[in-house]
Image (tube, grey):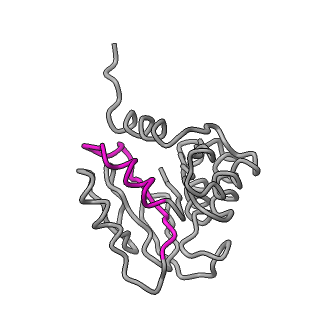
Amino acid sequence: MAIAASAGGVFALLELFGSFTSGPPVPTLVVQHLSPRHRTVLDTVLQRRTRVPVTLARDGERAAAGRVYLAPPDRHLLIEPDGTLRLADTARVNRVRPAADRLFTSLAEHYGQRAWVFVLSGTGRDGAQGAQAVKDRGGTVVVQDPDTAEYPGMPEATLKAGAVDHILPLHAIETMLRSFAHPAPAP
């Protein structure tokens, strides 16, 4: 599962993870566009608001279920078929690094219909092409309702690409993610 955000995204991520007592039964990979000129404290900020383990992704690390992995500034985050995380300093995509398009595409290639991606508040088009790759391989794409996003550019670009399964306000995305983390017992 992967989440992409840019401008306005930190607030959205705090909202999403703030009420979690445990993470989803899969790794959660996050691309938040951050300035490469400063050391990020996003992992610390998110960790203060959730009980889910949050860490900056490390190259070669095996992603574990129930954990949140953040792309470090100025490095693309990718995932391999066996769940190994890779960091790359290859060219910027849509003027950004890390790019959601790179993460979403790697998720689509290796996980196909099991891939779930979420596009939250942000400026620009990052995430739209990768979301299309996820959709083309049978995965699920959820975008924050642009009317509820602080910056609607990324959700709108993904909608224009025609690669969306669900358009939801942030609180409904939170409910969806919580249902993954805490599924209802079978009758």
Left or right: residue 135 versus residue 19 is right
| Residue range of the region highlighted in magenta in the rendering | 9-34
Residue 16 higher or lower than 42, as above or below: above
- The single residue placed furthest to the top in the displayed view is 187
Is residue 18 shown in magenta? yes
**Quadrant of the snapshot with the C terminus:** top left
Residue 127 higher or lower than 16, as above or below: below
Left or right: residue 175 versus residue 125 is left
User: Hey, which quadrant is residue 181 in on the image?
Assistant: top left
* Front one among 72 and 104: 72
Q: Is residue 141 visible?
A: no
**Which residue corresponds to the image point at 63% horizontal and 47% vertical from the top-left?**
146
Q: Position of residue 29 (x, y in %)?
A: 44, 58
**Which residue corresponds to the image point at 50% horizontal and 54% vertical from the top-left?**
3
* Mark count: 0
Left or right: residue 27 versus residue 118 is left
Q: Position of residue 105 (x, y in %)?
A: 62, 60
Q: Is residue 91 visible?
A: yes
* Front one among 167 and 67: 167
**Which residue corresponds to the image point at 51% horizontal and 60% vertical from the top-left?**
8
Left or right: residue 107 versus residue 158 is left
Q: Position of residue 123 (x, y in %)?
A: 63, 64
Is residue 100 shown in magenta? no
* Front one among 10 and 55: 10
Q: Position of residue 66 (x, y in %)?
A: 31, 49
**Which residue corresponds to the image point at 32% horizontal and 66% vertical from the top-left?**
43
